[in-house]
Amino acid sequence: FFFKQKTAYEIYQCDWSSDVCSSDLNMTAVGDNQGYWYPPIATMGASSGKWYYEAFPVTLSTGSAAHFMVGIALMSGTNIQKLVQNGYPGGDAYSWAYYGYTGSKYTNSAGTAYGETYGLGDTIGVAFDMDNGAVYFSKNGVWQNSGDPTSGSSMTGAAYTGLSGTMAPAIGVYYNSKITVNFGQRPFVYTPPTGFKALNSYNLANPSLPLV
């Protein structure tokens, strides 16, 4: 029953560059070896509710650097275009991300000290609470900056607050790096925070029902 609903990545916007996504149901984003950032963004997002997904770095970029951005972006045609132009989530004022190489958080092209670095073998969790306008990031089940996604309106340790609009998951890959995501098409590695759901069409249509 787990696969009966569309997940965000089954309709992932990877086709703007034929080099960016692999053929595994568009679950993996791959750089193009040209020395640029590429920012795949999901075409399924949410303006309310609490949502969770995971990302897994698979291949480091040239130089063995963890050039990965994992985050969310405001879902509109204009903002998606700006995201593509700036190359990675966190590269404009309409996206927010956690950077593997430094552990910093990014928005509007500005990095701020935030959490641990991450790379191969790590699982990055993203919890975005659109009822309270906050996003949190975890590494291997540990919420960075002592974040607590279940803290509601207090937004304890959130990476960013004051978020509004329809947000979609967004990934940044550089050069030949590769990263895979899970939106709930298979069991999560770590249990989502209480009240957070997998981003899929079933949950979006039935926001009051338990996590599936």
Image (spheres, rainbow, N blue to C red):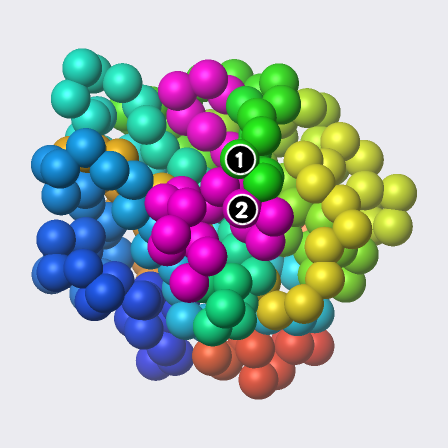
Q: Is residue 20 above or below residue 131?
A: above
Q: Residues within 10 Å of mark 2 (few under 14, many from 20)?
A: many
Q: Using the rendered view, name the quadrant where residue 21 is placed.
A: bottom left
Q: Is residue 84 above or below residue 201?
A: above
- What amino acid type should be assigned to the residue bearing mark 1? Ser
Give the percent coordinates (x, y) of residue 110.
58, 30
**Dot 1 and dot 2 residues touching (CB under 8 Å):** yes
> Visible in this render: residue 183?
no
Give SS at disc 1. Answer: loop
Q: Residues within 10 Å of mark 1 (few under 14, many from 20)?
A: some
> Visible in this render: residue 77?
yes
- Distance from Cα at disc 1 to Cα at disc 2: 6 Å
Using the image as rendered, state which of residue 182 and residue 171 is in the foreground: 171
Give the percent coordinates (x, y) of residue 32.
13, 43
Give the percent coordinates (x, y) of residue 152.
83, 50
Q: Residue at x 12, y 60 (%)?
A: 18
Q: Which mark is on residue 76?
A: none
142 drawn magenta: no
Using the image as rendered, state which of residue 170 and residue 200 is in the foreground: 170
Q: Which residue is mark 1?
A: 109
Residue lying at the far right of the rendered structure: 154
State which region is magenta. Answer: 81-103
Give the percent coordinates (x, y) of residue 199.
49, 66
- What amino acid type should be assigned to the residue bearing mark 2? Asp
Task: From the viewer's perspective, tell me whether residue 56 is left or right of residue 162.
Answer: left
Task: From the viewer's perspective, tell me whether residue 197 is left or right of residue 56.
Answer: right
Q: Residue at x 41, y 37 (%)?
A: 69
Q: Residue at x 53, y 35 (%)?
A: 109
Q: Which residue is mark 2?
A: 92
89 drawn magenta: yes
Q: Residue at x 19, y 52 (%)?
A: 20
